[in-house]
Image (cartoon, rainbow, N blue to C red):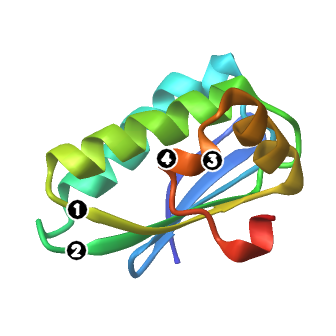
Amino acid sequence: MSRLLQQDGVCLEADGGVLCVSGDVDFDVAARLARAGSDWLEKQSADAGVTLDLSGVERVSSAALSVLLEWTRRARASGITIQRVRLSSALTSLTRVAGLDALLPLDAEAY
């Protein structure tokens, strides 16, 4: 696993085609997290399939959702398929409330 960002208890790692976030994502770290993940996405081949794993984000966080949406936008703009999105139970609940669950290829485990 390659560590892309470690800051304020938040860790972003990449392993193969998986981008993995853990820790309590807040707005103090969200911009750097989004940038680091976007940089990683830009290095993937246009026909790549990736998994975005936020199952390690335990606090309900609109900051984490905004990062997820930014990565989704960047991936689509680059022709990268998001094969799967893994969310913690807290983020799954927030995603449902926000009506975003229908827009993301969520892992069945998230439900």
Dot 3 alpha-carbon crowd within 10 angstroms: few under 14, some 14 to 19, many 20 or more: some
| Image position of 17 (left or right of 15) | left
Question: Mark 1 or mark 4, which is nearer the start of the sequence?
Answer: 1
- Disc 2 and disc 4: Cα gap in Å? 19 Å
Measuring 65% from the left and 52% from the top, which residue is drawn there?
11
Question: Mark 1 or mark 3, which is nearer the start of the sequence?
Answer: 1
Instruction: Please provide percent x and percent y for residue 30.
Output: 58, 27
Instruction: Please provide percent x and percent y for residue 79.
Output: 15, 58
Do tag 1 and tag 2 residues touch (Cβ < 8 Å)?
A: yes
- Mark 2 vs mark 3: give the one in front: 3
Measuring 63% from the left and 47% from the top, which residue is drawn there?
101
Do tag 4 and tag 3 residues touch (Cβ < 8 Å)?
A: yes
- Disc 3 and disc 1: Cα gap in Å? 19 Å
Which residue lies under the disc numbered 4? Answer: 103
The image quarter containing residue 34 is: top left
Dot 4 alpha-carbon crowd within 10 angstroms: few under 14, some 14 to 19, many 20 or more: few
Q: What residue type is disc 3 on?
A: Asp
- Mark 4 vs mark 1: give the one in front: 4
Which residue lies under the disc numbered 2? Answer: 48
| Image position of 20 (left or right of 57) | left
Q: What residue type is disc 2 on?
A: Ala
Question: Mark 4 or mark 2, which is nearer the start of the sequence?
Answer: 2
The image quarter containing residue 95 is: top right
Which residue lies under the disc numbered 3? Answer: 101
Q: Which mark is residue 27?
A: none
Which residue lies under the disc numbered 1? Answer: 80
- Disc 4 and disc 3: Cα gap in Å? 5 Å
